[in-house]
Image: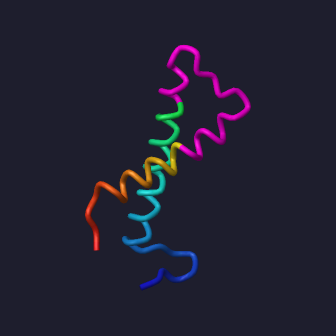
């Protein structure tokens, strides 16, 4: 089932919400890693954020059973 143009259904909202939570978790993980003494991503922070978001998503898919 797909949403009509310029509208969104509950399934679409749920997917957007999951994506938002993954992005926030990736940002939080990047922030926490930056708090470790000696860790400074510098100009690579955006890359670290993207990798952390992918790691969060992988962990979610790996740990949660789904059909």
- Assess whether residue 50 is covered by the magenta stretch: yes
Tell me: 40 left or right of 58.
Answer: right
Tell me: 67 left or right of 3.
Answer: left
Return the x and y of residue 36 as percentages of the image width and height: 50, 19
Relative vertical location of residue 15 with respect to residue 19 in this rendering, above or below: below
At x 47%, y 34%, the residue is 28
- Our reading of the magenta stretch's main secondary structure is helix
Farthest residue to the top: give it. Answer: 37
Asked which quadrant contains residue 11, the reply is bottom left
Q: Nearer the viewer, residue 30 or 14?
A: 30
Quadrant where the C terminus sits is: bottom left
Chain part drawn in magenta: 31-51
Farthest residue to the right: give it. Answer: 43
Tell me: 40 left or right of 63.
Answer: right
Relative vertical location of residue 28 with respect to residue 1 in this rendering, above or below: above
Farthest residue to the left: give it. Answer: 65
Quadrant where the N terminus sits is: bottom left
At x 52%, y 83%, the residue is 4
At x 42%, y 57%, the residue is 17
At x 38%, y 64%, the residue is 14
Return the x and y of residue 19 as percentages of the image width and height: 47, 56
- Assess whether residue 59 is covered by the magenta stretch: no
Count all numbered tags in the image, as a single digit.
0
Return the x and y of residue 7 as percentages of the image width and height: 51, 75
Q: Please, which colouring scheme is shown?
A: rainbow
Return the x and y of residue 32 as percentages of the image width and height: 48, 27
């Amino acid at each position: 089932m797909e949403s009509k143009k310029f509208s969104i259904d509950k399934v679409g909202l749920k997917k957007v919400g999951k994506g938002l939570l993954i992005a926030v978790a990736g940002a939080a993980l990047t922030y926490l890693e930056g708090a470790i003494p000696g860790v400074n991503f510098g100009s690579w922070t955006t890359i670290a954020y993207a990798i952390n978001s992918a790691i969060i998503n992988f962990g979610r898919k790996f740990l949660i059973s789904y059909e």
